[in-house]
Amino acid sequence: MESERPERTGAKSSRPPARKGQRVLGGTRFRSAVRALLVPLLILVIWFTVTNAGWVGKAFLPTPQRLIEVLTTGYHHLAGQRVPFGEGLPGAAWISVRMVLLGLAVGAPAGLTVGLAFGYSRWARDLLEFSLDAIRPTPLFATIPLFLVWFGSTMRSQVALIAFGVFLILTIQTTEAVRNVPHIYIRAALTAGASRFHIYRTVVIPAILPHMIAGFRLAVVVAWGLDVAAEFMGTQHGLGYLMIARQRYLDNAGILVLVIMFAAMAILSDFIMRAIAKRYTRWSPRGASPGLVGEMLGAR
């Protein structure tokens, strides 16, 4: 029995001990999540208190209970009857999502291609950069009537407007990313005997990938904004059209539901892009240490 005691006391557990850094990181994430929820909860409490106490009229701001009622009972027509799927809230949401996806599918490849061409060829920059720089400062919302005249009050006008806005954003984002590639990367590749096209494909494009994804995140957010603006200009479909219809009858609860839906879809799109960036840019310094300078200095 005595010979077995040392073996028992000296036996090591198969479970690896938790590292101090892992415990600190988990606690930091929990505290960050709690702090992130403080402001939304505070806004919800103020909203509930103000609306239920009668300090703000229900014609201006609905109560949270009214909003939950609209969300749970379904969206109804202006006459009070339930709308079929193709004309109601789910169908309108799908139309808006489809327009944004089509605009991104058309504008994103074009913007990335032109931006990469500007970084690769001086001839391409001399030919097109001045014209695009002259068009880019023009407010996109001011061009909505032109798109309606050119393409009509159909889905084509909205898709064209979204694609044009995404194209302009990704063109300048990609061009600036190429210009900011450290020259030491290029010199090292030239010293190794790589060709110009090989350097651009294997050095420049991987180096600008994090910046391109960041630019695409911005383009997705702008695409949702352009979709809302285009739907306000005489269209007969989408969430924007339902919002205009609700505004005519002062249905503030319905308007707020639509605003929340637009915000939720834009946030979900940005969350997907952040997940993609985190997955495919782990090798970059930003992906390896996502903390800001204050966190690196120990500030909370």
Image: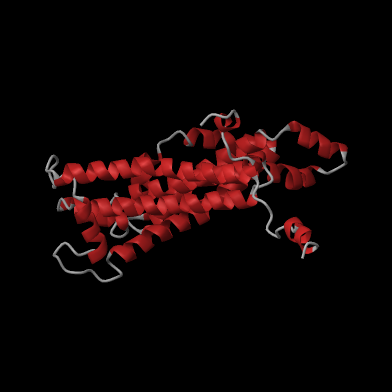
Q: Position of residue 166 (x, y in %)?
A: 49, 46
Relative placement, left or right, of 286 versus 238 is right
At x 41%, y 59%, the residue is: 97
The single residue placed furthest to the bottom in the displayed view is 84
Q: How is the image coloured?
A: secondary structure
Task: In this rendered view, identify the residue nearer to me: 35 or 147.
Answer: 35
Task: In this rendered view, identify the residue nearer to me: 69 or 261.
Answer: 69
Q: Position of residue 280 (x, y in %)?
A: 64, 51
Task: In this rendered view, identify the residue nearer to me: 18 or 163.
Answer: 18
Q: Is residue 74 visible?
A: no
Q: Position of residue 58 (x, y in %)?
A: 14, 47
Query: Which part of the image, by quadrant, shows the N terminus?
Result: bottom right
Residue 78 occupies quadrant:
bottom left
Q: Is residue 178 visible?
A: yes
Q: Is residue 169 above or below residue 13?
A: above
Relative placement, left or right, of 252 versus 238 is left
Residue 127 occupies quadrant:
top right
At x 20%, y 64%, the residue is: 76
Relative placement, left or right, of 60 versus 107 is left
